[in-house]
Image: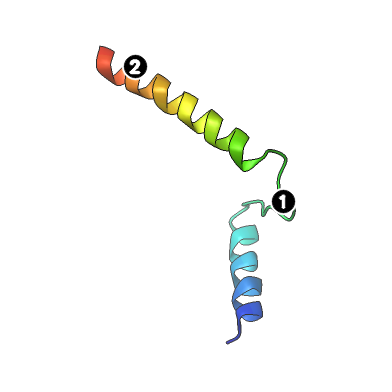
């Protein structure tokens, strides 16, 4: 099997299980995603400290 065959196979499996596949580069930058993740992790840490 070649890589293109694996890509096609995986695409079939994902769509069969009703998952959507991202076919573009996305809408946010890497920097914005990191900033969001760090903010969410800070909230998680606060929640864990209170528990």
Provide residue 36's location: percent of width, then percent of height: 55, 29
Depth check: 32 or 17 in front?
32
Count of numbered marks? 2
Residue 28, placed above or below residue 12? above
Q: Is residue 18 left or right of residue 39?
A: right
Q: Is residue 26 visible?
A: yes
Q: Which mark is residue 25?
A: 1
C-alpha distance separating marks 1 and 2? 33 Å
Q: Is residue 28 left or right of residue 1?
A: right
Residue drawn at 64 percent across, 67 percent down: 12
Residue 26, placed above or below residue 38? below
Q: Is residue 51 visible?
A: no
Question: Badge 2 is on which residue?
Answer: 46
Provide residue 5's location: percent of width, then percent of height: 64, 80
For disc 1, the neighbor class at 10 Å (few under 14, some 14 to 19, many from 20) is few
Q: Which mark is residue 16?
A: none
Residue drawn at 46 percent across, 29 percent down: 38
Q: Secondary structure at mark 2?
A: helix
């Amino acid at each position: 099997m070649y890589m293109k065959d694996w890509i096609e196979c995986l695409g079939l499996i994902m769509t069969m299980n009703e998952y959507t596949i991202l076919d573009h580069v996305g809408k946010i930058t890497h920097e914005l995603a990191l900033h969001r993740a760090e903010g969410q992790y800070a909230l998680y840490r606060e929640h864990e400290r209170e528990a």
